[in-house]
Image (tube, rainbow, N blue to C red):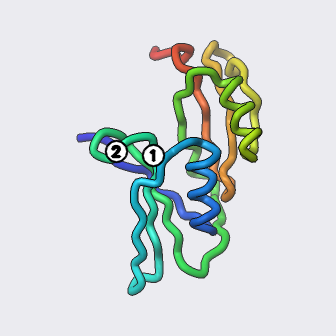
Amino acid sequence: MRVLHTMIRVGSLDRSIKFYTDVLGMKLLRRKDYPDGKFTLAFVGYGPETEQAVIELTYNWGTEKYDLGNAFGHVALEVDDTYKACEEIKKRGGKVTREAGPMKHGSTVIAFVEDPDGYKIELIQKGTQSTK
């Protein structure tokens, strides 16, 4: 078994695809409209779905906003340099909500960014994450 994807609902598919591709550097892997169900699915990621987990962006036609609730936490991405990643994300128009630095009570270097719908994305610096 392996993780295939994480699905999130988005209020504007084009805006979300732009964020995940232009700001975070993912690729749009596939997109399909389902007219009978009045929704569109788009899959974004850093590599082929056959090899890596991806994010499924679900746009329900006519729904522009969701109550995110408090159960979902975040999607985590590994980066080579969290500080540089934050600077690059800001240059590309992304919103950094927690600047890069060591996590409280640990040595893992992290940062948080927010996508256009308010979902949190954690950046974890490669080689700093404790595996214990």
Q: CA separation, marks 2 and 1?
A: 7 Å
Q: Amino acid at mark 2?
A: Pro
Q: Position of residue 128 (x, y in %)?
A: 56, 14
The total of numbered circles placed on residues is 2
Going by the image, does 36 lie left or right of 59? left
Residue identified by numbered label 2: 48
Q: Residue at x 47, y 54 (%)?
A: 28
Say if 40 sits above or below 49 in the image.
below
Q: Is residue 79 above or below residue 58?
A: above
* Label 2: how many Cα within 10 Å (few below 14, some 14–19, many 20+): few
Q: Amino acid at mark 1?
A: Gly
Q: State the residue position of label 1.
A: 45
Q: Is residue 123 above or below residue 28?
A: above
Residue at figure coordinates x 62%, y 68% from the top left: 12
Does residue 78 appear left or right of residue 3 in this picture?
Answer: right
Q: Position of residue 109 (x, y in %)?
A: 64, 20
